[in-house]
Image (cartoon, rainbow, N blue to C red):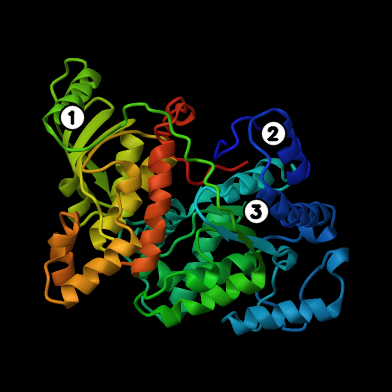
């Protein structure tokens, strides 16, 4: 089954009807768990229809202060005062100004849909997005890309003065509050429905700003749909200063209907045998990998390229035209950020990665960077040729292997004696580096493996490279 809908009808109707059309057309297979989830998407669709027909939609969507006893114009289907008071109390509990008037759109509950990799949650979100009421202004965005947009906007507001080009960082608490209102106004003032794909929080900077950022979003008025592999309570587990992140979780639980999509089937594990992933490492496969790269260079001499992101250099050691090549240690073991991976994915339509190891079950900076890299390449539909130590499904040691190695180490043995192949984990274990907890890292690696297999499929290989900015496309 295709992970993303390839045939999209632009007319507005319920997600369940769109799903039936895809089944009847043979584009997807009917899935019991997906059918069970469709009513929550239909419910949101119907609420959006009612909202578009209400007078509340005429109210300006901007941050403003009013006396606490005035909520503004409320749509007829939300007229009950007790519901208004409940929402006001909930929003105040998570840190909003008691005198802030909230837009009626914030009374429409969004969705937070979570479940295993490949269960179809993104496809269902896409059905809602593509078939939402035509009057609704909407955006669909990968969560990592969105946070990069937030970082850029913060950078622009804080440090760039358009009038005199002088640096004017804001330092006061009041300015910080105003700053997030301004960020929200810039990013979503023309958006009513925002769909986030693959919500995962591993960056402490992102975790610390999310509560204030989404508070500002809901003040302006916004319906949010999230998809994630984890329930809200398991986001950013074990993260630094997680207690500051918990209010965001409570906000999501108040503003969204939570839905658990449990499925034993990964509909993406149907990759073809296209030679985009070469393993194991040996002389013959090394020659194959090199030959493919030279063929795509078409006689052009490879050379180093320097890209720029946030005012700093991103080095690409080997590139020719729209093709680039990295050693795994060059692109994942050095201090590399999501922004670096995004600029690489936007610049090159084909990326070669040489020397990918088998990863340990436990978390590490290097594994986390690899996950971010694959996410970026996937979202921009890059063609990826990997030369790895093991096949995709063996890319991470199992939990049983991990537990066996731990027992072996506790008894005084060497981890190498039990087949642990991660070439880089030992250094990280000694240095104590961790971005995310072991379980979450292992879970995200499962999603990554699923994507690597999908990226070998005919449907993926025939999709065009998204070399333009794709994170905030508006319809």
Left or right: 459 as drawn, with respect to 121:
left
Q: Quadrant of residue 321?
A: top left
- Is 365 rendered above or below residue 92? above
Please name whichever residue, 311 or 433, is drawn nearer the observer in this view of the structure: 433
Tell me where residue 241 appears, x and y as whole percent: 37, 80
Check disc 3 and report its element: helix, strand or loop: strand
Q: Residue at x 46, y 26 (%)?
A: 458
Residue labelled with disc 2: 22
| Mark pair 2, 1: CA separation | 40 Å
Mark 2 or mark 3: which is in front?
Answer: 2
| Mark pair 3, 1: CA separation | 47 Å
Mark 3 or mark 1: which is in front?
Answer: 1
Tell me where residue 390 appears, x and y as whole percent: 25, 43
Residue labelled with disc 3: 193
Please name whichever residue, 428 or 410, is drawn nearer the observer in this view of the structure: 410
Mark 1 neighbour density, 10 Å: few (under 14) some (14–19) many (20 or more): some
Mark 2 neighbour density, 10 Å: few (under 14) some (14–19) many (20 or more): some
Does label 3 or label 1 sit earlier along the sequence?
3
Tell me where residue 452 appears, x and y as whole percent: 38, 41
> Which numbered circle lies on residue 285?
1
Q: Residue at x 18, y 69 (%)?
A: 429
- Is 437 rendered above or below residue 330? below
Check disc 1 and report its element: helix, strand or loop: helix
């Amino acid at each position: 089954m295709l992970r993303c809908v390839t045939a999209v009808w632009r007319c507005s109707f319920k997600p369940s009807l769109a799903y039936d059309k895809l089944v009847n057309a043979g584009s997807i297979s009917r899935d019991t768990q997906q059918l069970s989830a469709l009513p929550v998407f239909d419910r949101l669709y119907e609420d959006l229809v009612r909202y578009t027909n209400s007078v509340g939609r005429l109210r300006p969507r901007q941050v403003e202060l009013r006396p606490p006893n005035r909520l503004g114009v409320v749509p007829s289907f939300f007229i009950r005062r007790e519901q208004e008071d409940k929402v006001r109390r909930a929003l105040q509990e998570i840190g909003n100004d008691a005198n802030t008037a909230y837009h009626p759109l914030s009374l429409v509950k969004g969705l937070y849909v979570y479940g295993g990799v490949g269960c179809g949650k993104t496809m269902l979100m896409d059905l809602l997005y593509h078939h939402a009421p035509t009057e609704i202004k909407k955006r669909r965005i990968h969560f990592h890309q969105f946070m990069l947009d937030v970082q850029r906007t913060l950078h622009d507001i804080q440090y760039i003065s358009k009038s005199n080009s002088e640096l004017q960082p804001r330092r006061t608490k009041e300015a910080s509050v105003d700053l997030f209102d301004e960020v929200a106004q810039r990013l979503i003032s023309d958006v009513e429905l925002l769909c986030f794909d693959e919500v995962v929080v591993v960056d402490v900077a992102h975790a610390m700003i999310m509560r204030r950022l989404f508070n500002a979003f809901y003040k302006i008025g916004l319906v949010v749909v999230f998809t994630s592999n984890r329930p809200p309570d398991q986001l950013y587990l074990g993260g630094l200063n997680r207690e500051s992140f918990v209010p965001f979780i409570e906000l999501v639980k108040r503003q969204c209907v939570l839905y658990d999509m449990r499925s034993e089937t990964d509909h993406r594990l149907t990759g073809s045998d296209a030679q985009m992933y070469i393993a194991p490492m040996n002389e013959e496969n090394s020659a194959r990998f090199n030959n493919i790269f030279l063929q795509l260079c078409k006689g052009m001499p490879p050379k180093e390229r320097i890209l720029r992101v946030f005012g700093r250099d991103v080095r690409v050691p080997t590139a020719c035209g729209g093709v680039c090549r990295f050693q795994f240690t060059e692109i994942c073991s050095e201090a590399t950020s999501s922004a670096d991976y995004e600029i690489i994915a936007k610049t090159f339509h084909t990326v070669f990665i040489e020397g990918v190891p088998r990863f340990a079950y436990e978390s590490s900076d290097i594994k986390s960077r690899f996950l971010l890299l694959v996410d970026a390449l996937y979202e921009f539909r890059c063609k990826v040729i990997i030369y790895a130590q093991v096949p995709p499904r063996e890319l991470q040691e199992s939990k049983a292997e991990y537990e066996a190695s731990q027992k072996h180490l506790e008894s005084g043995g060497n981890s190498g004696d039990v087949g642990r192949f991660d070439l880089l984990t030992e250094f990280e274990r000694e240095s104590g580096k961790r971005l995310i907890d072991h379980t979450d890292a292992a879970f995200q690696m499962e999603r990554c493996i699923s994507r690597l297999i999908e990226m070998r499929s005919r449907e993926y290989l025939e999709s065009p490279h998204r070399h333009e900015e794709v994170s905030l496309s508006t319809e």
